[in-house]
Image (cartoon, grey):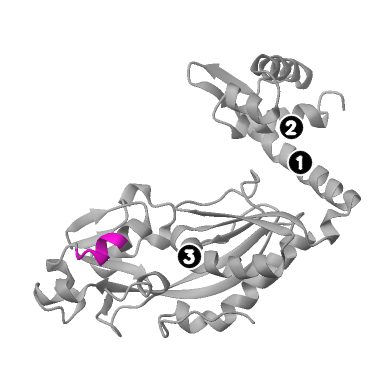
Amino acid sequence: MAALDWDNLRVFLELTRSQGLVDAAKKLGIDHSTVSRRMRRFEEQVGSQLFERNNQGYALTAEGHRLIEYAEQVESTVYAAAEELSGHNRLLSGQVRLGATEGFGTFVLAPHLAHFCARHPHISVDLLPVPRFVNLSKREADISVTLERPKSGNFVMTKLADYVLKVYATPDYLANHTTIRSTEDLASHPLIGYVDDLVFTEELRYNENVAPTAFRAFRSTSVIAQYTAACRGQGLAILPCFLAQQSHDLIPVLDGQVAIQRTFWLVAAGETRNVARVAALWTYLRDVMEPNRAFLMGESREMVWLE
């Protein structure tokens, strides 16, 4: 028990999550030499080397990787106990961090969250719209809107909404380039899309199915950058309808022939899902997506707001 006391596990977890020793020490509020000394003593106590130390910093060993899962379980239990005993889990106040995909988070969730905050003035919401997965196990967020269901871990999840992507271009672009009558015609047009080897989920690899031989005129890890390039007439882009419909400069190409459907999932860690402020945001997100089905499916250009 002395070898695996919570304080040592807390330092261990922060070191695995930080950029290095100095970064971990700063987040923990202690000196970096103290972090180093405590980790060496911790390794002696558990009888295993947890880190490889080199010029690049600290890298987990196989034993270190095995310990992470247990340490995170302890962290979750301590967190849940603290919330319960303080009464915070029953109060509609405090901070909630929401992770989301970049385009959906920026153009759909952000305006709705303004309404949520107005309803709950004592809840502070941090929105993380990023072109990658948000790691709930590392407590990067309390809730995540993601394109994939977690395959492991203690998570609660539900389907949030389906959405549709179409091919878009500006009227000027279409007027000054060869006519597009079928998907085969897409091959002769420049296509805007993702950087293939940096795509963070297979759910975003749709260009290969729609126009596999088209020249990739512009590529970016950011769907907002793709949207911006398409609005400037740089080429065709496969974009979510909820994003493309933000601009009157974009119109669907081959409407009725190309419509790619994907799903957003709502995910939270099991121990935080029922905390009152987390539950309030979870319920609000589910409630607000239902009346916006037509908007997400590209059948309407107008978002619907909850009363």
CA distance separating discs 3 and 2: 33 Å
For image coordinates 26% across by 60% down, the residue present is 229
Residue designated by label 3:
104
Q: Nearer the viewer, mark 1 or mark 3?
A: 3
Relative to 58, 189 lies left or right = left
Q: What span is in magenta?
A: 228-233
Residue designated by label 1:
75
CA distance separating discs 1 and 3: 30 Å
Looking at marks 2 and 1 on the same chain, the residue that comes earlier in the sequence is marked by 2
Looking at marks 3 and 2 on the same chain, the residue that comes earlier in the sequence is marked by 2
- Quarter of the picture holding the N terminus: top right
Q: Nearer the viewer, residue 298 or 120?
A: 120
Residue 223 magenta-drawn?
Answer: no
Q: Are marks 2 and 1 in contact (CB under 8 Å)?
A: yes
Q: Are marks 3 and 2 in contact (CB under 8 Å)?
A: no
Badge 1 element: helix
Q: Position of residue 58 (x, y in %)?
A: 56, 23
For image coordinates 53% across by 80% down, the residue present is 292
Q: Nearer the viewer, residue 250 or 79?
A: 250
Task: Residue type at mark 2: give it.
Answer: Arg
Res. 28 image quadrant: top right
Q: Position of residue 270 (x, y in %)?
A: 74, 57
For image coordinates 31% across by 68% down, the residue present is 238
As drawn, 238 above or below 180: above
Q: Position of residue 200 (x, y in %)?
A: 43, 52
Q: Nearer the viewer, mark 3 or mark 2?
A: 3
As drawn, 303 above or below 158: below
Task: Residue type at mark 1: give it.
Answer: Glu
Residue designated by label 2:
10
Q: Are marks 1 and 3 in contact (CB under 8 Å)?
A: no
Res. 183 image quadrant: bottom left
Q: Position of residue 113 (x, y in %)?
A: 59, 66
